Amino acid sequence: MLKKRKRREVTFKQELVDQDIILSVRHLKQFFTSGRGANKLRTKAVHDISFDIKKGEVFGLVGESGCGKTTTGRSIIKLYDVTSGSIYFKGYRINAGSRWNEKEIKWKTIRTRREIKRLRKVLRADIKREKAELKQQIKDAELDILARSSPELAAAKREFAALLVTIRERKNTFATDEYNYKTKVRDLKQALKEELRDRSDDSQDDNDIIVAEINKKYEGQLKRETNKFEKIKKAFVKEHDKDSKRVLELKAVIKAGDKNLSPTVKEELAAETKVFAVKAKEAYDLRVSELKTATNEVIADLKAKLADIVSTQKEKIAQINYDMKHVDTSIMNKMQMIFQDPIDSLNPRMTVEDIIQEGLQIQGMKDRAENSKKVIESLEKVGLISDYASRYPHEFSGGQRQRIGIARALIMNPEFIIADEPVSALDVSIRAQIINLLNDLRDELGLTILFIAHDLSVVKYFCDRIAVMYYGNIVELTTSDELFKHPLHPYTKALLSAIPKPDPYSEKTRERILYNPFTAHDYREEKPTLQEILPGHFVLANSEEMERYREEIKELDKKAEAEAKKEAARAAKKKAEPKAEPKKAAKPKAKSTAKAKADKPKK
């Protein structure tokens, strides 16, 4: 049976300013990759979580399998190199992710280079367009000047230029149509080959009939595509021949007109055109200069931002590497882990004594007698006798093996323990023993515990605060009592609805809530953030959900108040009822003398 204990009052706001914070996790990300190249997959096991644990507190992490609880614990104790974020233990950075910073430098550099390349390409296109406009302006001015002396020649030149543009555009359109036609024909032929192969594999009989049927099917499609393209081709040839003839006629007109112009008119035309060309060139140079200046300013700004990002990230990487290098082993000794599986976490080829004192030997404590003494003390702390030290793990039950795992963690005299589902592999009776043991050790040694579990009923009893995790995110964080009083997030409600009840009637009428994130939330307009809805109560929600959760809290409070009034009324009514006097035991009736004589046994 689980023992009751007093629960500490802890709020998240207090922890942020309290100097007694023993563990602080900030923006922790842990991603795993698999595959290579285009097939490379990235799994977001833990995605940007933050929390603090105060000295002497039991902090619970709950959620379904695969939500990132164990990954969080292993990242904290440095069994994983974290992708991003920082972990502080007693004020020292003990783990952090520099890979994320390095990747940010790489991708920011690549993106900036691509943007600069794009800007320069746009600049070249703008300059080319300005140059074409300059040439066109000069041609238009020349024709306007020519129209004063020879309107027919000017009109012929304008028509000639327009026809050349039309012919060029028509050629481009026809080339596109021809490419599309060839692509469709190629696709149809490929489909024909594939269907012939598939059908011939499926049926070896009547191959000739199948081939004829398939050819007939695709011949119709090919014929339709060919007829369509032939019509386009005929229209193109007709229009092209017509325009080509007109171009030849205009060439002759322009050639004759140029010959008929007097030398004086030619000189005046050249002089006026030259003056206009100079002015147009000045405007062109000014515009190109402005375009280059604007583009260079944007490029310089991009380069400056990139330099700032690279400098900042390199400083972070250097600081992280420095912190990692100078973390004292005595700090990490104060943090230990109790693993989930009591069988696989113990080496079957080592005795219990060797398993427990392995940590001491790794830290350079070579005194065998002193180590053996500490092993016996650790075994006694977890309720095992000293004779067990010479045995092997397979000689113990599941509960005893878990106690050995706890003793292995305690021998280093830790201040902080990560208990990774320490009771999930045990039966119900043994679970209560292990939880009571952890509870006693916590009070006796002043331990701080990060308790990872599935069972919310156990977590409610054992933990001061609870963080509910779903797919690598913390969706709700508050005290244990508050979580059961005001469960807000739909996933939290789903977990609570899964807790079995000992009352058969309640269990029969219990409604199971299923959580589907795609139907429970609408985050298309506003993304959710972890927000404080009550003092110390945080929930992952957007503005719309926060309003709905506030209304839910009011309804839950009203319901709880009504239940409390009913309970008080029942208690008062029961107290007011007069106590019934206990009935006196009836005296046995005396038997008659004759009957008594008859009942006597005969000699």
Image: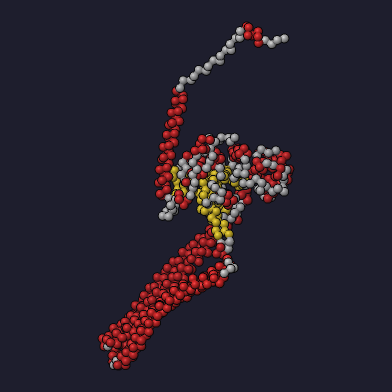
What is the residue that sits farthest to the left in this orientation?
148
**Which of the two residues, 473 or 131, is positioned nearer the viewer here?**
473
Residue 81 appears in the picture as rendered: yes
Residue at x-position 29% and y-position 92%: 261
Question: In x, y percent, where is residue 57?
Answer: 55, 42
257 in relation to 587, above or below: below
Where residue 492 appears, x then y in whole percent?
49, 45
Q: Position of residue 104 (x, y in %)?
A: 51, 61
Q: Is residue 376 left or right of residue 228?
A: right
For residue 138, say whether it is visible.
no
Residue 321 at what x, y percent from top left?
58, 57
Q: Quadrant of the C terminus?
A: top right
Q: How is the image coloured?
A: secondary structure
Residue depicted at x 65% and y 8%:
597
Residue at left 37%, top 81%? 239
- Side of 110 relative to 367 (left or right): left
